[in-house]
Amino acid sequence: MHPRIIDELRAIVGTHGLIAEPEQLRTYECDGLTNLRVVPSAVVLPASGEHLQAVVRVCHRERIPFVARGSGTGLSGGALPVEGGVVISLSRLNRILEVDIPNARVVVEPGVINLDVTERVAPFGYFYAPDPSSQSVCTIGGNVAENSGGAHCLKYGFTANHVLGLKLVLPDGEIVQLGGKTLDPPGYDLMGVFVGSEGTLGIATEITLRVVKRPEVVQTLLAAFHSTDEAGAAVSEIIAAGILPAAIEMMDALSIQAAEAAVHAGYPQCDALLLVELDGPAAEVALSMERVTEICRGCGAWEIRLAQSEAERMVVWKGRKAAFAAMGRVAPDYIVQDGVIPRTALPRVLREIRQLSEAAGLRVANVFHAGDGNLHPLVLYDRSVPGQEHIAETLAFDIIKLCVQAGGSITGEHGVGREKQKYMSTMYAEPDLDTMQLVRCAFDPQHLANPDKVFPRPRLCAEKQGRYEPHPLEQAGVAELF
């Protein structure tokens, strides 16, 4: 990058807010998807919305692509840098600006850690519902970009259901306000368009969130089964009975083994484990939990435990939330996949994943949000074995194709990013993708905000990495710019 631009960025964010040394830039060469790496030309760390706006204006003027990044915990390469581009790290924009308990609203900057929101409102009897497994480290800005979910989204919904307002810096540096503290604002639902857009439409500088009153009672049941078929059947029967749990999570034998080795949650050694959490008024929870217990026993559960204290409940959840990271105890490398299937297809799809695993000669651990059919197969492999990484990637994508064939989706909450962009065409026809591109072009006609993500390789070269250069067909008026 030209030294003149580096100097201008440094003048905006200060010496400590700019990283340009090659060795230091490598810290930002990937997010949680570590098998894709690109070293950016510079990293800037704005400390205010004004800094952020000024940095984006420089990028727009110089036509430099930029990628926003929170904690870098994304698992689909959504924060993968662009060659020749700038990474805008939001880690210093980490203030909770307003806590409005009477209206159940909180205004935060994008670099605020997810769990910090709940900790801030907990003394008032409230919590922030979307809770990704990485909630102790991931940021609200990243959650908004990916429309993150979590265990409790079965009942409470995804991030989109909890964002009421956004203050944005558009890719040309202009600031706009979408939504606010009130519900159902007039006009197009542009906020709904922005949430889940994976950083391709701009960068949020302030986010107004809805927080939820903590329920009177929370109970967590642990049920051990002889097979994932039995556990999957129990999930379907619980929902069919008209019960809406706060969460239903499933773990298979391999994920239990890893979690136990890491946090000693006291899980039984079984082939499938369900965690069923109910919350609400005490009488209602007690009645529903009796029914859930009956259903689990009827489906073959051979051990059922109800957490007897908040401490015990937290230990049970600690094992579940540590399962991804704990997988390093049973394999040197793994790929975390993310797909969605209809809930009733769980037993069949899990069997077919096992068959794919055996055919590929690699182990697959399953730990996922069973209640909403959001699978997270973890494909285990050893990078040091020649060819095994490629086999693992092929197996991971075979599993995603299986999800689509079962009537599901290529992603539930991790986003498309770079990892799955080539599989968008398995879900969407060309007119569908073109319509999405038109929305993107309305926000970012120069394709500077997180380019080369989400969409399959475009027809023209406008989205190639690096600086934009018009395609001859575009200049001749023969083809549209997408």
Image (cartoon, helix red, strand yellow):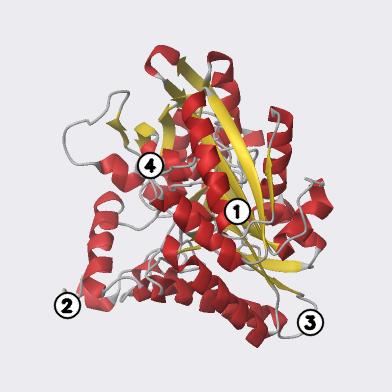
Where does residue 53 sit, x and y in percent of width and height? 42, 36
On screen, residue 153 versus residue 220, left or right, reads left
Mark linked to residue 375:
none
Under mark 2, the amino acid is Val
Front position in the image: 130 or 202? 130
* Residue of label 2: 478
Circle 1 SS class: helix
Can residue 474 be seen by looking at this rendering? yes
**Residue ID for mark 3:** 385
61 vs 420, nearest the viewer: 420
Question: Which x, y percent locates residue 449?
Answer: 41, 53
Write the residue at 70% across / 84% down: 361
Q: Are marks 4 and 2 in contact (CB under 8 Å)?
A: no
Name the residue at 21% across, 30% down: 185
The residue beneath circle 1 is 297
Distance (Cα) linking label 1 and label 3: 43 Å
Cα gap from disc 4 to disc 3, whole angstroms? 41 Å
Of the two numbered discs 2 and 3 in the rendering, the one whose residue sits closer to the viewer:
3
How far from the left and from the top, in percent, is residue 151?
A: 54, 45
Q: Which mark is residue 160?
A: 4
The amino acid type, in three-letter code, at marker 1 is Arg
